[in-house]
Image (tube, rainbow, N blue to C red):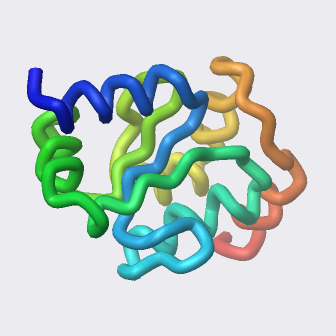
Amino acid sequence: MSDAQEQIRQTVTENDVVLFMKGTKTMPQCGFSSRVAGVLNFMGVDYRDVNVLADEGVRQGVKDYSDWPTIPQLYVKGEFVGGCDIITEMTLSGELDQLFDQKGVTYDKGAAEKIREANS
């Protein structure tokens, strides 16, 4: 396993929620990363952000690690959940809430409902 792969594995196992993204949670550098970070921020999820633009090894390494070709990538309790489209669908369907509940991740249920109401 490469150094980047080991760094990724360690990051996703040591943090309950991790978002590999372009930019940071306070300053996303692409629309897709911004959308997922915005959902997590609005829902009050405590998560680790990893800026893939800061390290080419991590940028390619996370794609290899998950066998998923795009960024952003969300991990919850060590499991790859998906990218922007999947997280958007899960948020709107309530599946993201269910996942967080099952995994014991704290979030604002009222904020999650507001997202669904605004998009219905």
Height in image: 50 above or below 24? above
| In the image, farthest residue toward the front | 3
Q: Mark yes or no: residue 25 visible.
A: yes
Camera-side residue of 57 and 69: 57
Camera-side residue of 64 and 54: 54
Residue 68 position within the rendered picture, expressed as x and y whole percent measured from the top left: 17, 44
| In the image, farthest residue toward the right | 110
Left/right placement of residue 51 relative to residue 6 reads right
State the quadrant of the C terminus: bottom right
Camera-side residue of 36 and 78: 78
State the quadrant of the N terminus: top left
Quadrant of the rendered image containing residue 51? bottom left
Q: Mark yes or no: residue 84 visible.
A: no
Left/right placement of residue 13 relative to residue 65 reads right
The residue under the point 59% across, 48% down is: 93
Quadrant of the rendered image containing residue 116? bottom right
Residue 72 position within the rendered picture, expressed as x and y whole percent measured from the top left: 35, 58
Left/right placement of residue 75 relative to residue 82 reads right
Residue 82 position within the rendered picture, expressed as x and y whole percent measured from the top left: 35, 44
The residue under the point 63% across, 62% down is: 39
The residue under the point 22% across, 43% down is: 62
Height in image: 71 above or below 101? below
The residue under the point 71% across, 45% down is: 46
- Counting every numbered tag in the picture gives 0
